[in-house]
Image: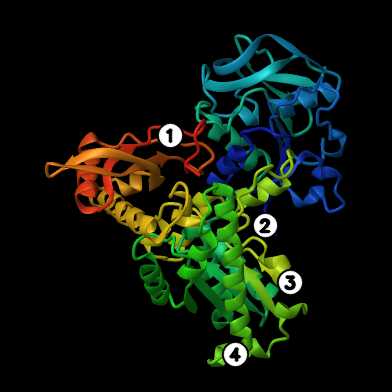
């Protein structure tokens, strides 16, 4: 059984960072909402240790999350972080009050008890990151202080005679310089995790689980050319071989030559992929639509229709032995159970979003994976990557020896260029943006900048501007270039690309792309802006 650390989420903005840091230590962990410990499926013996996250709440609020920690204390190693630490003090006889002055930002540890296992190898005056308006003002008698700052007496504590610890700073953030050391002390030295969760072990375990789960059943899957769907498809292919049927749809909103190039890449990987040219269907559905959400819905609806038609075609009139085998199955496309599954490249942040303590997001992208298909086609869903973060997917992909031009590919939105053309979409606008985007992306690669950027793209604005070309007045389109650095897309900074590069690319776009006479560069970060313009 996989060794697992449980992270109970109380709504902190940093909860995912805790998970990412623990996984950097080759230790598997899962995030669940704070009330998970009341769930009938919760078994404390399934976890090597439990971490209580921070929270935007105060333990003094009546509506704050207050699970009964007696369920956990003394039965497994326990670490409370910020709110989690204050909750331990609050529930077991201590006092938590509003701080006289808000404790937010950098601080240094003026006292460290290195005899405490949690603070082993943590330096005196080590920098930590505080983010709370409350503080522990009195601790129960069996709480020993293990760390302090000049303003926070109980920066760290240990409950005597049990493996229960608390810290009022955030070890998971970059500004806590020895945070990873502290987390390693907890998960390795206190929880006794063996650090054996690696890309290789994930691949081996996942393939065996897929074989057991799917047996001789078939899987139909939509591919996008991106890293998530590709890695998921390769894992499924290794598990069930010819029983995986992949569909790659050209929605007319892909990058220049992408349909042909991606199909070629998949062919070299041995995947059974059918390419479907559906440009006309998508352009027809998008005609006259200018609102971003209307465009997303039109793209998503058309995709579902195309995918369903192609998937049913695989089952109804198969020309190959493999498809005859699929046809022979009791077809769940018509509502029967078993036999056919829908493969998806869902990753862990998507799962966390749906089970978060905050509840499902109020705004969900209309076109996410192949949303709507499972219910409409009565398919069971298989998601090989739903426990991985994006960077972990890439590490698994490299271990699977998937070509680097797919693994290192920048994220690309599901609706494609459809949300990078502001306003109504036409074939001519797609042509213009494909040419602009091709020059920009190839320019980044040729300049050695592509791998330094997390995501780059071009935007065709609805603005036209006056220009002069060859002594003649022009009145043509304005395009914007965008490049950001990020870890997971939740936050992003604009990339400071060299002026010389921007000048060269701008000049090439204006000279080579008919219909464009002005290029601008987006220097907005997220937040307050988003990465995409629509």
Q: Nearer the viewer, residue 425 or 166?
A: 425
Question: Which residue in the structure is indicated by mark 2?
Answer: 2
- C-alpha span from label 4 to label 1: 50 Å
Q: So how many labels did they put on this image?
A: 4
Residue furthest to the front in view is 473
Query: Label 4 crowding class (10 Å Cα cut-off): few <14, some 14-19, many 20+?
Result: few
Q: Which quadrant is the N terminus positioned in?
A: bottom right
Residue furthest to the top in view is 100
Residue plotted at (67% across, 80% down): 217
Mark 2 falls on what kind of element? loop
Query: Label 1 crowding class (10 Å Cα cut-off): few <14, some 14-19, many 20+?
Result: some
Q: Earlier in the sequence, mark 2 or mark 1?
A: 2
Judged by depth in the image, the label closer to the viewer, 2 or 1, is: 1
Q: Nearer the viewer, residue 74 or 303?
A: 303
Q: Position of residue 158 (x, y in %)?
A: 72, 25
Judged by depth in the image, the label closer to the viewer, 4 or 2, is: 4
Question: Which residue in the structure is indicated by mark 1?
Answer: 493
Q: Position of residue 59 (x, y in %)?
A: 79, 23
Rendered position, 342 above or below 501: below
The answer to whether residue 379 is visible is no
Residue furthest to the left in view is 471
Q: Position of residue 214 (x, y in %)?
A: 67, 75
């Amino acid at each position: 059984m996989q060794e697992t650390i449980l992270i109970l989420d109380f709504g902190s903005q940093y909860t995912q960072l805790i998970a990412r840091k623990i996984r950097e230590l080759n230790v598997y962990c899962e995030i669940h909402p704070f009330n998970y410990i009341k769930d009938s499926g919760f078994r404390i013996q399934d976890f090597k240790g439990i971490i209580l996250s921070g929270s935007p709440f105060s333990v003094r609020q009546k509506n704050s999350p207050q699970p009964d920690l007696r369920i956990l204390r003394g039965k497994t190693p326990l670490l409370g972080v910020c709110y989690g630490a204050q909750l331990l003090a609050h529930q077991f006889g201590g006092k938590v009050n509003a701080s006289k002055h808000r404790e937010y930002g950098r601080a240094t540890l003026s006292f460290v008890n290195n005899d405490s296992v949690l603070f082993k190898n943590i330096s005196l005056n080590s920098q930590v990151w505080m983010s709370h308006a409350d503080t522990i003002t009195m601790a129960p008698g069996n709480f020993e202080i293990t760390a302090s700052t000049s303003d926070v007496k109980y920066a760290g504590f240990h409950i005597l005679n049990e493996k229960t610890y608390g810290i009022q700073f955030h070890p998971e953030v970059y500004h806590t310089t020895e945070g990873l050391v502290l987390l390693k002390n907890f998960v390795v030295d206190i929880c006794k995790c063996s650090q054996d969760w690696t890309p290789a072990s994930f691949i081996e375990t996942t393939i065996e689980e897929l074989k057991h789960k799917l047996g001789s059943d078939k899987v139909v899957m939509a591919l996008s050319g991106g890293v998530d769907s590709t890695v998921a498809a390769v894992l499924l292919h290794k598990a069930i071989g010819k029983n995986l049927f992949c569909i790659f749809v050209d929605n007319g909103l892909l990058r220049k030559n992408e349909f042909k190039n991606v199909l070629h890449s998949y062919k070299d990987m041995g995947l059974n992929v059918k390419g479907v040219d559906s440009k006309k269907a998508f352009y027809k559905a998008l005609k006259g639509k200018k609102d971003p959400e209307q465009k997303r819905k039109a793209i998503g609806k058309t995709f579902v229709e195309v995918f369903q038609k192609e998937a049913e075609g695989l089952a109804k009139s198969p020309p190959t032995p493999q498809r005859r085998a699929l046809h022979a199955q009791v077809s769940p496309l018509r509502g029967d159970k078993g036999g056919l599954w829908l493969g998806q490249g869902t990753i862990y942040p998507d799962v966390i979003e749906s089970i978060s303590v905050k509840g499902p997001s109020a705004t969900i992208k209309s076109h996410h994976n192949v949303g709507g298909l499972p219910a409409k086609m009565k398919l069971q869903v298989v998601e090989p990557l739903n426990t991985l973060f994006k960077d972990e997917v890439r590490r698994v992909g490299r271990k699977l020896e998937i070509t680097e031009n797919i693994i290192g590919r920048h994220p690309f939105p599901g609706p494609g260029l459809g949300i990078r053309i502001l306003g109504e979409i036409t074939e001519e606008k797609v042509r213009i943006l494909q040419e602009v985007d091709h020059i920009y992306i190839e320019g980044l690669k040729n300049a050695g900048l592509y791998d330094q950027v997390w995501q780059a793209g071009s935007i065709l604005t609805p603005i036209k501007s006056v220009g002069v070309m060859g002594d003649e007045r022009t009145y043509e389109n304005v395009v914007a270039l965008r490049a950001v650095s990020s870890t997971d897309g939740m936050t992003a900074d604009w990339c400071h690309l060299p002026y010389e590069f921007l000048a060269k690319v701008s000049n090439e776009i204006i000279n080579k792309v008919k219909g464009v006479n002005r290029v601008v560069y987006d220097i907005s970060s997220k937040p307050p802006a988003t990465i995409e313009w629509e």
